[in-house]
Amino acid sequence: MTGISLYGIVSDITSTQEPVLSVKIQDVTGAVWARLHFARSWSLGRLGLGHTIYISGLMCSVGTGKSLELRWVENDVGASFINISCLPALLNSSCLHKLSCLSDLSAEPTGTRVCRVWLDQIEHCHVTARLSHTSCGYFLDDGSSEDLKCNFCQRKCNAELARNFHLKITLADESGKLFAWCTGQTAVELLQITPDEFCELPEEEQIMYPSSLEHETFKVALVNCRKKVGLMDQDHDTIAWEITRAMKCE
């Protein structure tokens, strides 16, 4: 069977060799693994646990043990992959979201939720700027060898590095508070400064900088990224929520 389309939530990701990754897609009816074959290397930007995706052009076959196997090839006709949780238009298009309160998230912990929040408890904010792989947005392990290899997409990435924020921060609204993390452009939107600009500040100013943002109001997209254990967790696996998009409210 060919030309299959799926809409669901990423519940697991595994990588064994470049340029093939396996993604577990889940909805209310169940879950299925799909093997993604890329023409050269990972080309979909950042993808994480809990992200809502739409994928088309899947092929289905019966594998060993009569289990169904889904396969997606990047260059096939009709093949597309959209990460809805990270769409730039998600926050400013009312047809793409419905505003939720933070207290709603515990009752409905799956899917992408959009909330209007302010930054709170800045004294507990944690900001670091680290090297990441530009193709997929995942951080490199500290102390990596000279021959750098991305743990996520398995690609050698010496020439594809950029400094990115890893931000952990408390969000609040009238209904409650939530501790969440983010990286990439989302962290830049919240901090209102680039990683390079931040690193040029004296150390004392870096420590004090987040305090200038307390009570700033944003519209944010949130996903539940909690997973038991695994390669993709990195060091934010104890934080249940990822901020995938952010937009300052004027």
Image (cartoon, rainbow, N blue to C red):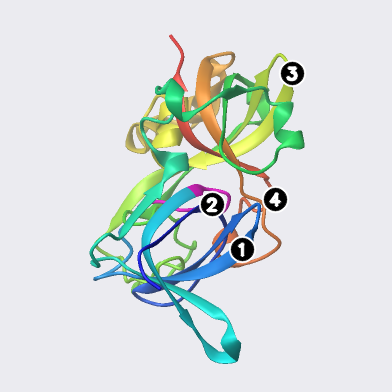
Q: Nearer the viewer, mark 4 or mark 1?
A: 1
Say what amino acid the circle numbered 4 marks: Thr
Looking at the rendered structure, the kind of residue marked 1 is Ala
Q: Nearer the viewer, mark 4 or mark 3?
A: 3
Disc sitting over residue 8 in the figure: 2
- Residue at point 67%, 34% (across, down): 179
Q: Which of marks 1 and 3 precedes in the sequence?
A: 1
> Is residue 75 left or right of 188 when viewed as pictured?
left
Task: Name the N-terminal-most of marks 2 and 4.
Answer: 2
When asked about the image quadrant of residue 41, the answer is bottom left
Residue type at tag 2: Gly
Residue 175, numbered label: 3
Label 3 neighbour load within 10 Å: few <14, some 14-19, many 20+: few
Secondary element at tag 1: strand
Nearer-N-terminus badge (3/2): 2
Q: Which residues are magenta?
A: 45-52
Which residue is pictured at 56% across the width and 54% down the height?
49
Residue on which disc 1 sits: 31
**Mark 3 and mark 1: span between their CA atoms?**
32 Å
The CA span between labels 4 and 3 is 23 Å
Visible residue check, residue 234 = no
